Image (cartoon, helix red, strand yellow):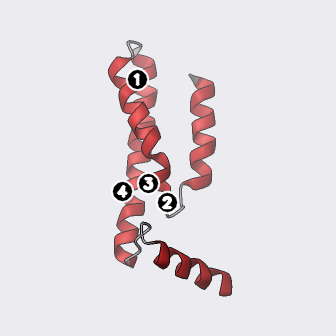
Amino acid sequence: MDQFYELVMLYLVHYAHHVTFPELVYPLIIKCKKFIKVCKVQNFVKVIRGLLEKVQENVNLIEERRQKTGLNVKDNKQMVEKKKDIILC
């Protein structure tokens, strides 16, 4: 469990501030919820539940900032324009 937690945290640290973070962690959220339902070891459930809460907080923060800026990551044209703006700066 410790090794899993450490590897997940290393992955999440790299993408925590990325605009597509909510989409990147969606599979992780689904798997963690499923794990919490089936796991009988309360210490493991507690660790995964804490991880899930922190991930969800960050997802909410990123989505809130997206709404404030009007950024729609599903719009490829808008994302290409943003990328060009960043590269030109």
- The mark lying in front, picked from 3 and 4, is 3
Q: CA distance from mark 1 to mark 3?
A: 22 Å
Residue at screen point 50% across, 64% down: 19
- Residue at 54% across / 82% down in the picture? 81
Label 1 sits on a secondary structure element that is helix
Residue placed under numbered mark 2 in the picture: 20
Rendering coords of residue 2 (x, y %): 59, 24
Q: Is residue 67 left or right of residue 87?
A: left
CA gap, disc 3 to disc 2?
6 Å
Q: Is residue 56 above or below residue 82?
A: above
Give the camera-side residue of 77 and 3. 77
Earlier in the chain: of badge 3 and badge 4, it is 3
Kindly identify which numbered label has been placed on residue 22: 3
| Residue at the spot of label 1 | 45
Amino acid type indicated by mark 3: Pro
State how far apart marks 4 and 1 are (Cα).
22 Å
Looking at the image, can residue 89 be seen? no
> How dense is the environment of label 4, judged by Cα within 10 Å: few (below 14), some, or many (20 and up)?
few
Regarding residue 8, the answer to whether it shows in the image is yes
Secondary structure type for disc 4:
helix
Residue 67, image quadrant = bottom left
Which amino acid type is shown beneath numbered disc 1?
Val
